Amino acid sequence: MKLLREPLEKAIAAAATLHGKSLALLIASSLVATTGIVAAGASSSGGLSPMEAAAARALMEEETALVATAAAPAAPEPDYTPTSSPEAAPSAETAPSGPLPAPAPAPAAAPAPEPETPVVPPTAPELPEAGPVKHVFLISLASPGYEAAFGPSSQMPYLSGDLRPQGVLLGNYSLLDAAALPNAFAAISGQPPTPAAKSNCPEYEECLYEVETLTLPDQLVGARFSWHGYFEGMVDAEGKPDSCVHPEPDLVEAPAAGGYASRLNPFVFFHSLLDLGDCDENDLPLEELAGDLAKADATADFSYISPNLCNAGFLEQCAEGAPQGAAAADAFLAKVVPEILSSPAYKEDGLLIVTFGAAEPAPPIDPAVALAEDPRKVGAVLVSPLLAPGGTDAADYSPYSLLRSIEELFGLSPLGNAAGTKVRSFASAFGGGNGGD
C-alpha cells in the first residue's frame, strides 16, 4: 500500500498548485490509474487480494476527496470569430471590365464550445464493518487433555470452575495436530499442516510463507481494523523486551527453557507481515497488554495472547518447585483474564476465547484411560457480555473454525481451508455467520 500511496500523495501535492482544466486533467489521469489497478486485480485468476483491495480503496478515497475539495474550474472565455473586414471597392481606373465576380460566401460561424464533462470518481467499495463484537481476545495454551481441563477432576480449577460458568463451552473443539504450529497456522491463515510444521519448524526458514499467503492480520489491516500479538518473555539477544523476535534464516532456534519460543508466535512465519513492517509494529511483548487495555480506543480490535513455554502448560518447562503443566497454565489465566474482563473494550463489546493450540497431556496413570481419549479433543471457552453464561455448544469445531468465526465477526471472507463448506462458525451465536454445514 505504501508503494501506491506515495505517488498519490505527490499527485495531491502537485494538484495544490493547479487550477481549472489542469487540475481536472490531473484528477482524471489519477482516476484512470486507479481504475487500471482495480481492473488488473479483478481480472487476475484470484481477483483482488485483501491488500490490493485495501490499497485500491485508499487510492479511490484520496482521489474522491481531491475532487470534492478542488475549486470549480473558471468559466471559459467566449470564443469570438472575428469577421473579415470588407475589401476596398475597386476604383473606376482599376475596376476590371465585364461582370463583377460573385461575392465570396460568408465564413461559417464557429461552433459553440461543448461544456467539459465533469469528472465523476468511481464509487469506492464499502469497507466491512464489525458486528456486535468489536474486540476479540484470543488466549492460546497447551492442553493437558479435555478431561484434565474440563472434567470433574479438572487440573485447571480457574478455567473450569470460574471462567467456564461465565461463558459457553465448545465441547467438541479439536486440534489438527498435537504440535503447536500446525494449529496456529490454520487459526490465522487457514493453511493446512505440513511435515515441517508438525515438527514445530526446527529450521525456521523451511516454514516461512511467501508474501502472497495472507493472514487474518493482513485482512484486518486491509479493512482498517487493528491487531496486536502479545507474547510473554519475548526479548532480544540482550534480554530486553523486543517485538517480532524470530530466528535468523538458516539457523535453528534454541529457546531458553520455559521462555519464549517462535513456535508460540505464528505471525513471525509470514512474509506478508514481516516484509511490510506489520510484525515489527504489532507483534509485541506481553508487558504491553496492560497499558493497551486501559482505554477502549487503545485496545486492538483483535488481540492474540500467548504465555511462555512454562505458563502455556508445556511439560518440563518450569523451574523446579514452580507450578507445572496445566497448573501453570491455569495460574496464567487467573492473572491475565481478570485484566481483560475488567477492561473498557471487553465490557462494551468484547469476546474472550480461551483455546488450546497444542496437546500436551500429562503421562497417564492408567494407560487404558489414555487410550479412550483423543488428545486432539481439547475444548475451548467463549466469554462475552453478549453471550448467555453457562451454555455448551456440542458442534464440531477446529482451528479453521476459529479463523472463520473471527473473520465473520469482522465481516471478512474466509482464508484458505477456513472457506471449506464443512467448516463451522460460532459467529452465528452473535447474530452473524453461516454456521457451516
Image: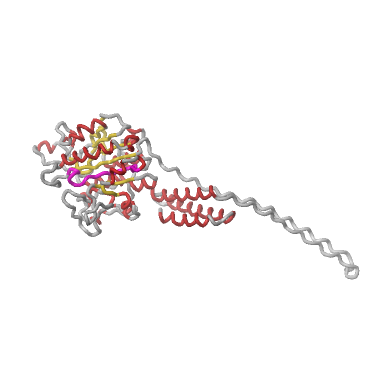
Query: Measured from the top left, where is residue 389 in percent x and y?
Result: 27, 29
> Which residue occupies the foreground of this view, 81 or 71?
71
Colouring rule applied to residues: secondary structure
Quarter containing the C terminus: top left
- Write the start and end of the magenta stretch as one range: 298-313
Query: Measured from the top left, where is residue 267 in percent x and y?
Result: 28, 50
**Res 408 visible:** no
Report if residue 350 lies within the magenta region.
no
x 24%, y 45%: residue = 306
Q: Would residue 120 be found to the left or right of residue 344 on screen?
A: right
Q: Would residue 75 be found to the left or right of residue 293 on screen?
A: right
x 33%, y 47%: residue = 217
**Res 242 visible:** yes
Query: Measured from the top left, where is residue 386 in percent x and y?
Result: 33, 32
x 22%, y 39%: residue = 335
Q: Could you say which quadrant of the image residue 421 lies in?
A: top left
On screen, residue 80 above or below 288 = below
> Which residue occupies the foreground of this view, 72 or 407?
72
Query: Measured from the top left, where is residue 401 in percent x and y?
Result: 29, 40
Q: Would residue 229 be found to the left or right of residue 122 on screen?
A: left
State the residue lying farthest toward the bottom. Answer: 93
